[in-house]
Image: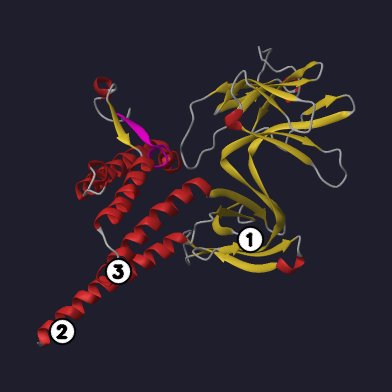
Amino acid sequence: MAPFFKFFASLRLTVVLLALSLVLVFFGTLDQVEYGIWHTQEKYFESFIVVWAYPQAWPAYDALFWFRLPLPGGYLLGGLLLANLLTAHFTRFKLSWKKSGIFLVHFGLILLLVSELLTDLLAVESQMPVDEGGTANYSQSYHDNELVLIDRSHPEYDRVHAIPSDLLEPGREIAVPDSPLRIRTVQYFPNSQVGRAEGPVDSPATEGTAVTMNIVATPKRVTYAEDQLNTATAFVEVIGPEGTLGTWLVSNVIDERFPPQLVRLGEQSWEIALRFTRHYYPFEVELVDFKHDKYPGTDIPFNFSSEVMVRHQDPTKNQKALIYMNHPLRYEGLTFYQASFANQDTTSIFQIVRNPGWLLPYFSVLLMGLGLCVQFGMHFFKFLSKSHD
């Protein structure tokens, strides 16, 4: 066996990788206190290399603030474990009935690793708040933002040009498709304090709400708390064919409660805004009834349930359903979970997950269970046959 394949097929490599996985989970759990589950998952398990820093809240931080511990990330460990398992099969195992259980277990493990990668790459989570008696046809992410220019000139629909906030780098110019406009980012704050100033301010904004209402933005440290949102804010310059059209302050807290900010070029106009990333659907969800049940004599929640009517553009796909805890609605490749409520029990909030590989973990667990039953079953019946001899 070549040294290269011998190394990757080694059982010692398997043990080392599993031990490093435990170390990664340990330090990721420590950082979850400060960064929350979403950022921790992205930092530790959706990366190749991660550096753990001595937490500021720990004792002796003034003496150990310099300490950094590099660790292999989830993608690196998962990739090496997959390579280890595949190489071991090709070099050490021969397909036979006696080894069929082991093959099923290993195939289940491979499927589990692949399903986790597909989930990281393809799964999309968002939330949809719906008022009782109202409808909604889109959900939005509270972790990602987008800059949009909306052309409302058509009487039947709006044309929306969306630019992910990851592209809003200061100084970068982006052409807006199907329009004569370009966007140049002047400043971008992932989190900020937005409010009205009492006196004159030195602001890059020359147009829009920031000018008419004397609004200013001050950068803040990004928060990772589960119950807090980051106020993303940007100063963006809109450039037309003949030069600049002005600079606007846009923020995800400057929403429908404020007058729309309009970019005008001749007889054309676009509404400009920075908002949480939206996902539109070819159907709308109507909240027929929301119930918030409590244990008798207490304020402790017993059950949340939402009766919904889903109306599709294709009427044959209309569906009525009851969504409650641990009983989601699966519809059009989406899973609707009962997540929360608001506005004194008049608004239901659904967690919507699109995960094309959601069935793979179930298949992998079934395969591993079947493999264990086959392998141990063969040894058990072999033992029984010897005991009767």
Q: Residue furthest bottom?
A: 388
The residue that label 3 is drawn on is: 100
Q: What is the quadrant of residue 266 in the picture?
A: top right
Q: Is residue 351 left or right of residue 78?
A: right
User: Residue 204 magenta-drawn?
Assistant: no
**Residue ID for mark 1:** 332
Horizontally, residue 383 falls left or right of residue 342, namely left
Mark closer to the observer (3, 1)? 3
* Residues under numbered marks 2 and 1 in contact, where contact means CB atoms less than 8 Å apart: no
Mark 2: few/some/many CA within 10 Å (<14, 14-19, 20+): few
Residue that appears at 31% across and 44% down? 25
Q: Which mark is residue 385?
A: 2
Q: Relative to residue 249, is residue 90 depicted above or below?
A: below
Going from N to C along the chain, the mark reached first, 3 or 1, is: 3
For the residues labelled 3 and 1, the Cα–Cα distance comes to 37 Å
- Residue 194: x percent and y percent? 61, 26
The disc labelled 1 sits on which kind of residue?
Glu
Q: Amino acid at mark 3?
A: Ser
Cα distance between the residues tagged 3 and 2:
20 Å
**Which of the two labelled residues, at mark 3 and mark 2, occupies the earlier sequence position?**
3
